[in-house]
Structure formats: C-alpha cells, structure tokens
Image (spheres, rainbow, N blue to C red):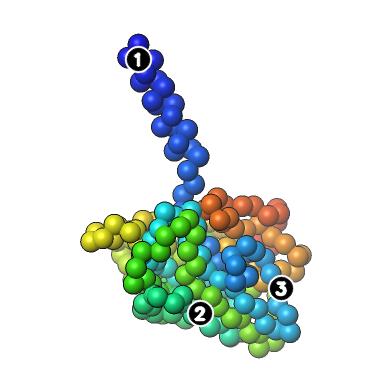
Amino acid sequence: MNRLRLCLLLTLLLHSASSHSAPTIGIYTDVNGTQCTGTTTNGFLQGSVWANGVDGITGAEFDIFCNQYLNHNLTLVFASEPGSIQVGDPLLKECVRYCWWTPWGGPVDSGGGTNLAFTACQGGSRVRLFTFVLIEKAPTQDIAFHIMGHGINGLFNCPLITLCDAPAYTKLCVNDTNSSLPDAIINPQDGSAVLNCPSASGVLLSVQQASWSAVKSLYR
C-alpha cells in the first residue's frame, strides 16, 4: 500500500513538473508581446520586451544584441516600464571580442546591458519590461535580435529575473543563450524564419524552418 502511494505521488510530481513551463525573456515586434516577426511601416516599428511564464518578479538583467545596430543602419530607443529603476541601456552598444552572434559564442564584454528593478513585486505570469522604437536610417532587411546574459555579471552569465522573495530577491536564469536562432526578426527576406519565440506561458514556439545558411547570414 505504501509503495502504491509513493508511485502515485511520484506520478503527480512528474506531471506537475512537465506541465510547468520555464520562465523566458522575449523580445517582440509589437507592444503587446504577441509577434516575433514584424515589418517596419515607413521605416518605423514599435516593439516590446516581456518576462513570460513567471509567478511575479521584482526585476530582470540581460543584454539585447541587434545585428544591424552595430552596422549603424538604424536607431533603437528602449523605455522601461513605469514603476521601475533602470541601470544601463539593454542594447549592446559595442563589442570588444566578438561583433556577431554564433551558436558557439557571442558578443561579450559589451558596452550595453541593463539591470532593471521594480519598486514593488509585479504579479502575474507576464510582465512587460520595456517598450522600444526602431527607426530605419535606410531600408534594411533581416534585422535580428537575440536576448543575452549581461556581460558584466560573472556569477550569472545568462538572462535572468529576480523573484518576489524579499529580502533574498533570488536570481533565476532564463532562456537558452547558446541557441543559433534569433529571438525576433524585423523585415525578413523570406517573410518568416525559425525563432525562439516565447509565448505568454514561456513555451518556445517555432514558426517556420529556415536553412542554416540563411540563419548564419543574419549575424555576419
């Protein structure tokens, strides 16, 4: 009888663990955080950054790499949400060792990245962290984004969130920083691409298969 109870308990625990999605930080091509592929209108687009699949957070820490920004092809301006304290711009402004993203590594020792803290716990499963405006200086295709770990944090080399467990404010790594796929694409040449696009629950969604050569070309 005790063995039966133990088996039932293990089954329930495994089911609960498998049905719970891991938290993610996603960058989106709309302000409501529903699209990861977008198109500029008259050289303009508004987007957003969200924490997904969470149970309330007090902050986040991460970098955003944009392949075209380092080529000076566009202007990007990020604004944090009301009720937050922002230290640093999330956008990677320069590369010291690498100036492209690859599956085996990416930009490090960056001149960008942000540490965002809310003045109170933000409840709910989704929390918007930033909105942003993109303005093209000239028509530009394949503007690709990648959420990265903040380069200055040696203990947590990952995008992270901080939980609502004051005074500890536990840090929790999110996302797969070694993925070869972008997290969002604006003006894709073929109209779509494979993306690590997190839904509201935090589950990563694949959109459409793309060749490895096409993905690599986004980060040269």
**Quadrant of residue 40 in the image?**
bottom right
Tell me residue 146's x, y (percent): 53, 66
Q: Is residue 51 above or below residue 73?
A: above
Front-most of 118 and 174?
A: 118
Question: On residue 211, which mark appears?
Answer: none
Q: Which residue is mark 3?
A: 39
Q: Amino acid at mark 1?
A: Arg
Question: What amino acid is found at the position of numbered circle 2 in the picture?
Answer: Phe
Q: CA distance from mark 2 to mark 3?
A: 18 Å
In the rendered view, tell whether residue 85 sits above or below residue 188.
below
Q: Which residue is mark 2?
A: 78
Of labels 2 and 1, the one closer to you: 1
Q: Is residue 36 left or right of residue 22?
A: right
Identify which residue, 16 or 157, lies in the foreground.
16
- Mark 2, Cα crowd under 10 Å, few <14 / some 14-19 / many 20+, is some
**Residue occupying the point 29% across, 57% down:** 165
Cα–Cα span, label 2 and label 1: 56 Å
Give whichever of discs 1 and 3 has the lower sequence position.
1
The circle drawn on residue 3 is 1
SS assignment at label 3: loop
Image coordinates for residue 47, horizontal then vertical, percent: 59, 73
